[in-house]
Image (cartoon, rainbow, N blue to C red):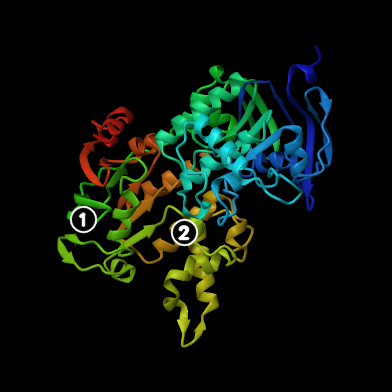
Amino acid sequence: MSQSQEYILDVRGLSKTFSGIKALDNVQLAVRKGEVHALMGENGAGKSTFMKILIGLLKPDSGDIFFEGAPLQVKNVHDSLKKGISMIHQEILMVPELTVAQNIFLGRETTRFMPGWLDDQTIYRKANEILTQMGVSLDVRTPMKYLSVAEMQMVEIAKAISNDAKVIIMDEPTSAISDKEVATLFSIINDLTKKGVAIIYISHKMDEIFTIADTITVLRDGRYIATHSATELDTNRLISLMVGREIDSLFPDAVELGGQEAISVKNLGRKGSFSGISFTVKAGEILGMAGLMGAGRTEIARAIFGLDRFDEGEIAVNGNLVSITCPQDAMQHGIGYVSEDRKALGFIPNMTVKENITLGNLSNYTQGLFIQQKQEAKIASEVAENLRIKTHTLDQKVANLSGGNQQKVVIGKVLLASPRIIILDEPTRGIDIGAKSEIYKLIRQLTASGIAVIMISSELPELVGMSNRILVLSEGKQTTILSKQEATQETIMAHAMPH
């Protein structure tokens, strides 16, 4: 049997250049039927370009792709779907006004009587069958705009399954779903692979990769680095292959400062969201906040920062009770906030790095109606240098930076207000392992300078590795605060599960 017949998908020598810059350089990938093949690499490694070629969005400059032993030529995405290659995108693609069923079969609608006469009953029945097989309970007649992000993600997965795909590419499929839904997804993947479907799985979450993957291929800077069985690698070895260097310790050692109490929250509550929340954070300390999706973590952060009103309880900063009714109040009391959704709430994509960094403190660089551009550029340059933001120029649009550098811009903007307390909501979501390491070092620098940090994260290794103490939430209620010594992933999950 030739190599191309052994593998359902066999890619050799793939290259792609944009404006003289090589995005892919002689890349290879060989995927067997019924396996989960993880494709790993930092942001900018070439994973997205590679996948866009496979599904017909881009044409390669050179190289060969064999599918089921025969040369693969795809003209467009529709052609790729017909041949049996489907993709679940990280950014959810859907038509909000159409129903769940209509989105699942978009472009492949069933007709009856005459062309153009849609057979909605058949579409609803088929969609219901697919979701039931997946173990997902959703009304297929509901318009997509009424679903949660996690539910939308499940519809995207159903769409890929409905194509009878032979290869499904999953790009960060768990970035917006809860642990329970991750377990459902892994069960679906298991069923698909038993039927011979091959999964190409892209994720920055190491624990997922070692749970789900059979084989791992690593790309770095657009080049093929290695392919290994998942059992041959551990986290440190995989990180080393991805970043091209050893990361001695992903989580830098904490500096114990024994600082004064920076913020105290007592009996905080918001009707329908959370109640009875009490904690303190000292200067130089990281208080982690853990809980399943819907536990109330982000809602608490928003209330402390004044984005949402709280109905009961009190907040004290440096021992003094404060009134916070809007973000301006919070900022005046030295509180900064980095949102979990940096694209929607953290920065303005089409503005430059310089403009985004200084946006929250523009009054410091204006004279009358005019911005003092030299002063603005000087300050932005200092922030970019201190945070090691990788950008060709401060006039580059933030939309064109990697996820890790976008996050640094958001943190830089918050730091310019000189906060003494910073709330970080999912600070490393969707960024690669090398950038995560840099963000962790940056957080440690903040605490070493005496800043108190409240860090919300869905990644338990991150919480355990970074926090001095961890507050655990379940269904809007505080279940415990664990010390560094008590905090393990198992203990956190035991307290986070609904009782």
Amino acid under label 2? Answer: Val
Residue at the image position 76 percent from the left and 33 percent from the top = 83
Q: Secondary structure at mark 1?
A: strand
350 or 141: nearer the viewer: 141
Q: Is residue 56 above or below residue 268?
A: above
Quarter of the image for the N terminus: give it.
top right
Q: Is residue 135 above or below residue 172?
A: above
Q: Nearer the viewer, mark 2 or mark 1?
A: 1
Q: Position of residue 319 (x, y in %)?
A: 15, 60
Residue at the image position 34 percent from the left and 48 percent from the top = 455
Q: CA distance from mark 2 to mark 1?
A: 28 Å
Quarter of the image for the C terminus: give it.
top left
Q: Position of residue 122 (x, y in %)?
A: 62, 40
Left or right? Give the position of 77 relative to 236: right
Q: Position of residue 32 (x, y in %)?
A: 68, 20
- Disc 2 marks which residue? 410
In the current view of this chain or complex, which residue is farthest to the front? 113
Q: Position of residue 441 (x, y in %)?
A: 42, 45
350 or 122: nearer the viewer: 122
Q: Residues within 10 Å of mark 2 (few under 14, many from 20)?
A: many
Amino acid under label 1? Answer: Gly
- Disc 1 marks which residue? 269
* Upstream in sequence: badge 2 or badge 1: 1
Q: Residues within 10 Å of mark 1 (few under 14, many from 20)?
A: many
